[in-house]
Image (cartoon, rainbow, N blue to C red):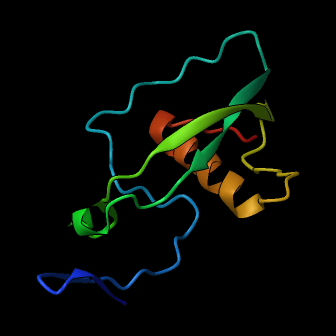
């Protein structure tokens, strides 16, 4: 793809599908994970509204996976919830409308904490 913000500013970008669990940033050190008493946690995250590019002349790619373009986001009073249970099996069982998305974050969590169990 070729993006043109102005006749002075063009960039080519060829995105590829992301494989679940692919890390773009590797932590310099992974600390041992100490599992506490709780085997189930519920997380909550507010919805986000992204109004997109506000200034197309600011479209600048900073590396192969990121760009800076003058975006603005807002959080709403609606929430997404996720329940995570720790298991002894290494399998990741996902019940979601977006299983690849959830699998990606579960694999990132396992890699960044060196967790050997499953979810």
Please identify the residue farthest to the right as the structure is shown. 95
Q: Residue 77: x percent and y percent? A: 74, 28
* Horizontal side, residue 62 vs residue 80: left or right: left
Say if residue 104 shows up in the picture: yes
- Look at 46% across and 39% down and name the residue there: 112
User: Where is 34 relative to 73, above or below?
Assistant: above
Q: Residue at x 85, y 53 (%)?
A: 96
61 lies left or right of 50: left
Q: Residue at x 76, y 50 (%)?
A: 92
Residue 87 visible:
no
Picture coordinates of residue 53 (x, y %)?
41, 61
Return the x and y of residue 88 as percentages of the image width and height: 77, 35
Q: What is the quadrant of residue 40 in the picture? A: top right
Image quadrant for the N terminus? bottom left
Q: Is residue 36 above or below residue 5?
A: above
Q: Nearer the viewer, residue 107 or 50?
A: 50
Q: Which percent across, then down, holds residue 42?
A: 79, 24
Quarter holding the C terminus? top right
At horizontal 23% and vertical 68% (from top left) the residue drawn is 57
């Amino acid at each position: 793809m070729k993006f043109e913000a102005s006749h002075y500013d063009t960039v080519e970008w060829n995105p590829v599908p992301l494989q679940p669990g692919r890390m773009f940033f590797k932590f310099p050190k992974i600390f041992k994970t100490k599992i506490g008493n709780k085997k189930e946690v519920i997380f909550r995250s507010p919805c986000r509204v992204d109004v997109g590019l506000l200034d197309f002349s600011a479209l600048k790619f900073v590396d192969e996976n990121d760009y800076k373009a003058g975006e603005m986001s807002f959080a709403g009073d609606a929430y997404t919830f996720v329940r995570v249970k720790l298991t002894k099996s290494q399998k990741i069982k996902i019940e979601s409308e977006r299983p690849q998305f959830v699998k990606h974050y579960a694999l990132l969590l396992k890699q960044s904490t060196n967790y050997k169990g499953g979810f």
